[in-house]
Image (cartoon, rainbow, N blue to C red):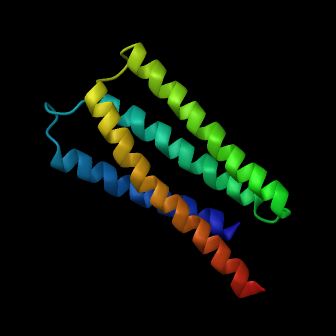
Amino acid sequence: MKPLFDFILKLCILTVVLWGMIYSLLDPGTVDYRSVFIAWVMVATNTLAGYLIFEYAFARESRVFTIAVFGGLTARLLLLMVLVFVIIYRHLAVINDFVVSLFAFYCIYLIVEILGYQKKNKQKKNTA
């Protein structure tokens, strides 16, 4: 479970740094923090779910791994698209702040997710 703990720790550190930057660099009157928070929750949950699916499928056979990882990716993206549609359609957030922060968080957290995959693969090679 060590790689999972490392991943969650890095996710928490990144979150603290990002929110510190958001609060220190953006004026409260210029950005809707609620919209940014909604985008962050969606992306952070998506990233954590992706890594957990990867952890589940990692030791499985190739076919199961491929189905789990790519099927999970498809399901997660479809769920995100539905949530974005609902949030925009029902005006639950300021659209510009929400979309920009969703895109920024997604790009940043995707990098962290990929680095977590690489570290897990490297750790398996070192033990083999």
Find residue 124 and report its horizontal and vertical position in percent.
72, 78
Image vertical order of residue 26 relative to residue 12, above or below = above
Quarter of the image with the N terminus is bottom right
Give the residue drawn at x 33%, y 57%: 17
Find residue 22 and report its horizontal and vertical position in percent.
25, 47
Find residue 101 and report its horizontal and vertical position in percent.
33, 40
Q: Is residue 57 left or right of residue 114?
A: right
Q: Is residue 83 left or right of residue 100?
A: right
Image vertical order of residue 105 relative to residue 9, above or below = above
Give the residue drawn at x 59%, y 33%: 78
Give the residue drawn at x 41%, y 15%: 89
Q: Quadrant of residue 117?
A: bottom right
Tally of numbered tags: 0
Q: Is residue 41 left or right of residue 98?
A: right
Quarter of the image with the C terminus is bottom right
| In front of the other: 5 or 116 | 116
